[in-house]
């Protein structure tokens, strides 16, 4: 395989799909839903090139259970969907957390609740970071903000999923899915199968004990041990992979917090900060579970106020407030239903927040 | 001197864990038949059992093979993926009537339609056992359950579903048979069908399903012998015993007899 | 340098493809770029629109409030969007289809009879090329040679026979832009 990195101009959906293949995904199960249909289409087209399996499931419910089965059988596996489809997958995700199985799930978030619409939204933040489904498990959640990051994060997610034996969720949105940008592709390479001594499948007689993949733990202590193991994984992930980026004034009066497409709008606001007459800095998480609590807490002691911008009525803002613990005012600019604030809207809100905070 | 030979040994493909099924329940018989077939083909180290939700939820404790416990109704989706990852594995699901014919109807129909190359062992005892006796999609008209206390009424709950007949409308399956675990003769016939189903899977012929009419003395409110008689006298009339499909042979033959 | 280009036309006019060509050409010229199809509630009724942000630094927001330049391909789009252009911005319109020149005080207007040009060249599929040529030359962000090179790279080889017609259309648009400079 060529190690030359090809720079292409592609959509977020295509970059995500190719990121999966580059990350070693050879099994894809999915069910069509707008606005991410380009991903299964891309997989159907390109999986055969790498000897992989693409299968269109009869529903999201079946798709996630195929992911469960493939992961149990030792495969790097992925599914992609959008909000209503991710709702349907919650039970399967919970089983995977209970059985401690790795998998990569992509959610190109659209407007909700209900059937909602197919426009941009960030209203599945809780669904990703507080779930999945019932029980105590959580999904490691990555928040790309460009086509390049969709590609890179998806590829990297497979290694993280196996490292923590946990679901890794890529939280995209309808705009990131459909917008096109230059993207430097990670070369496809043949990887050895993931190291999963617990996986089921044919093996030489007597080479090992039989393997059982299960999430039914009737014994209280055994069930609690699963919960404790998961918590230890999340603590390890917090120490090892919490990631964020910062951009703007080194002596900010107001800190902007945003992820994904909202962070792009906020980046625009930082670039035009002089219009607001306020020194601005953007902190954007690349992971929201684990959450970059420490840097937000540090800034909260140095800025007059924090403004959170997100495409929901206020989900991500709660994690920011938990990090800040009242050290400074935290305000929210939230839009929903497919509407986005403009850069000017953000700057107007910044002026308001700064005035209220007296900076 | 002639050596004593054990002619009916305990199957390798069963663990020695004590089963938790009720007295008179035929789950144990079904487990034993499947285990014998696995042993006869010598594929225990290649086999992955998919346990589902119902009384057989602990099947992974009883089958001495790699096992995956699936969520309610989704066994066929899980098995599909295991087989796609390991085409050389021998994969079977073990599902009750609530799991397969109620919550999991979509998954079983689509796995069958795709002709997925695994085997389904379908236990039909016309009642939800694990949750303590509620109506199943296969509950007979007039049958009393805890959620059809006056007997299943077609006005309220419609008619029972004949799964084999329904799947027989599809082109995907290679093998479809209904057997009963009510008499030694029928049990031998059931074993032949299970063996044939695994044989076709090993030959890569595609989807195979064996429905087994089974007893539930506990939730039928019968003693074990009464439950056996209930299969013979009542269930078989509604669920005829037949090999519906045997693709390579291409013929339909009588099942349920030791001919 | 930061160029915010807004393009609009009727569905089927190839607005999105034209926008992707410009964006691809910007990438090939070593610039940062995003291409963003817009679906705001106002944009309905067959209109197809996209926003392209080209920058030598960060792109930041892929959306635009006051585009520096616009390429408008039909009269409905002209009526609806021309007024949103930034002061001093460049407005390129397909004058073959837009009879009533939109009012845009303080903007530079280039009228390109794109359909007539395509007819003269003898290839109706080159309509958007003269508009792109006028935009590239009018803004100076890209040269028509940049665009032609990227078009060649994007087109499957069997369509390379159309390159001379496309290049001719690009040049005709560029000439109109130069004549107004």
Image (cartoon, rainbow, N blue to C red):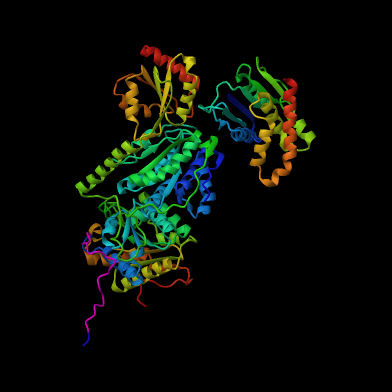
- Along the line of sight, which residue is nearer the eye, B136 or A185? A185
Is B127 situated left or right of C76 in this image?
Answer: left
- Along the line of sight, which residue is nearer the eye, B235 or B190? B190
Magenta span includes B190: no
Magenta span includes B19: yes
Which is the main secondary structure of the residues drawn in magenta? loop
From what the image shows, is residue B11 above or below residue A31? below
Q: Percent x, y for residue A113?
A: 42, 33
Q: Mark yes or no: residue A263 visible.
A: yes
- Along the line of sight, which residue is nearer the eye, B24 or A32? A32
Quadrant housing residue A205: bottom left
Q: Percent x, y for residue A25?
A: 45, 49
Q: Percent x, y for residue A72?
A: 36, 53
Instruction: State the extent of the magenta-drawn residues as a range.
Output: B3-20
From what the image shows, is residue C127 above or below residue A104? above
Q: Mark yes or no: residue C96 visible.
A: no
Q: Quadrant of the N terminus of chain C?
A: top right
């Amino acid at each position: 395989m060529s190690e030359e990195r090809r720079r292409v101009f592609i959509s977020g959906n295509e970059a995500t799909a190719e990121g999966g293949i580059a990350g070693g995904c050879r099994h894809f199960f999915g069910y069509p839903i707008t606005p991410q249909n380009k991903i299964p289409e891309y997989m159907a087209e390109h999986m055969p090139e790498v000897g992989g399996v693409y299968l269109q499931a009869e529903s999201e419910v079946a798709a996630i259970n195929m992911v469960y089965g493939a992961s149990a059988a030792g495969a790097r596996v992925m599914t992609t969907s959008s909000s209503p489809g991710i709702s349907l997958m919650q039970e399967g995700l919970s089983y995977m957390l209970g059985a401690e199985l790795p998998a990569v799930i992509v959610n190109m978030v659209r407007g909700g609740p209900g059937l909602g619409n197919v426009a941009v939204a960030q209203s599945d933040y809780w669904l990703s970071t507080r779930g999945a489904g019932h029980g105590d498990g959580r999904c490691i959640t990555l928040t790309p903000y460009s086509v390049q990051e969709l590609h890179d994060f998806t590829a990297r997610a497979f290694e993280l999923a196996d490292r923590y034996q946990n679901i890794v969720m890529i939280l995209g949105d309808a705009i990131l899915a459909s917008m096109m940008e230059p993207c430097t592709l990670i070369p496809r390479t043949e990887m050895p199968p993931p190291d999963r001594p617990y996986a089921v499948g044919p093996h030489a007689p007597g080479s090992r004990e039989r393997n059982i993949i299960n999430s039914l733990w009737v014994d209280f202590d055994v069930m609690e041990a699963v919960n404790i193991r998961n918590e230890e994984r999340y603590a390890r992930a917090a120490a090892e992979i919490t990631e964020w980026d910062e951009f703007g004034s080194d002596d900010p009066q107001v800190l902007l917090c945003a992820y994904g497409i909202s962070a792009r709008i906020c980046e625009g606001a930082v670039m035009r900060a002089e219009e607001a007459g306020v020194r601005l800095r953007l902190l954007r998480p690349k992971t929201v579970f684990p959450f970059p609590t420490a840097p937000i807490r540090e800034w909260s002691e140095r800025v007059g106020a924090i403004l959170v911008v997100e495409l929901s009525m206020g989900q991500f803002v709660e994690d920011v407030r938990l990090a800040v613990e009242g050290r400074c005012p935290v305000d929210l600019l939230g839009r929903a239903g497919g509407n986005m604030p403009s850069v000017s809207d953000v700057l107007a809100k910044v002026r308001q927040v700064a005035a209220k905070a007296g900076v | 001197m002639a050596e004593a030979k054990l002619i009916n040994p305990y199957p390798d493909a069963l663990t020695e864990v004590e089963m938790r099924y009720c007295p008179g329940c035929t789950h144990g018989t079904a487990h034993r038949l499947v285990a014998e077939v696995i042993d006869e083909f010598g594929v225990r180290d290649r086999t992955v059992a998919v346990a589902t939700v119902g009384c057989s939820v602990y099947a992974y404790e009883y089958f001495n093979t790699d096992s995956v416990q699936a969520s309610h109704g989704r066994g066929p989706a899980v098995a599909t993926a295991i087989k796609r990852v390991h085409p050389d594995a021998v994969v079977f699901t073990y599902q009750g009537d609530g799991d397969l014919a109620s919550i999991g109807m979509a998954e079983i129909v689509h796995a069958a339609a795709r002709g997925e190359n695994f085997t389904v062992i379908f236990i039909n005892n016309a009642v939800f056992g694990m949750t303590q006796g509620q109506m199943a999609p296969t509950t007979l008209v007039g049958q009393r359950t805890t959620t059809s206390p006056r007997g299943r009424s077609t006005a309220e709950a419609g008619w029972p579903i004949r799964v084999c007949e329904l799947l027989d409308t599809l082109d995907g399956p290679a093998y479809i048979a209904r057997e009963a675990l009510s008499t030694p003769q029928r049990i031998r016939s059931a074993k032949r069908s299970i063996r044939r189903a695994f044989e076709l899977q090993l030959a890569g012929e595609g989807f195979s399903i064996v429905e087994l009419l089974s007893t539930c003395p506990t939730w039928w409110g019968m003693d074990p012998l009464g439950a056996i008689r209930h299969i013979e006298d009542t269930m078989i009339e509604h669920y005829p015993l037949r090999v519906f499909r045997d693709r390579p042979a291409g013929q339909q033959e009588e099942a349920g007899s030791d001919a | 340098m930061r160029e915010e280009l807004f393009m609009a036309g009727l569905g089927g006019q190839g607005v999105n493809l034209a926008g992707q060509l410009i964006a691809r050409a910007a990438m090939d010229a070593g610039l940062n770029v995003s291409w963003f199809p817009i679906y705001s509630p106002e944009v309905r009724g067959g209109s197809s629109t996209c926003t392209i942000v080209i920058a030598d630094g960060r792109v930041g927001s892929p959306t635009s409030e006051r585009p520096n330049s616009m390429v408008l391909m039909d009269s409905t789009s002209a009526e609806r969007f021309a007024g949103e252009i930034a002061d001093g911005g460049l407005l390129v319109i397909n004058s073959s289809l837009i009879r009533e020149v939109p009012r845009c005080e303080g903007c530079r207007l280039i009228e390109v009879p794109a359909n007539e040009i395509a007819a003269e060249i003898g290839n109706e599929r080159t309509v958007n090329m003269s508009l792109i040529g006028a935009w590239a030359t009018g803004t100076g962000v890209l040269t028509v040679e940049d665009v032609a090179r990227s078009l060649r790279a994007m087109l499957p080889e069997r369509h390379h026979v159309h390159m001379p017609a496309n290049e001719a259309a690009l040049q005709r648009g560029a000439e109109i832009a130069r004549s107004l400079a």
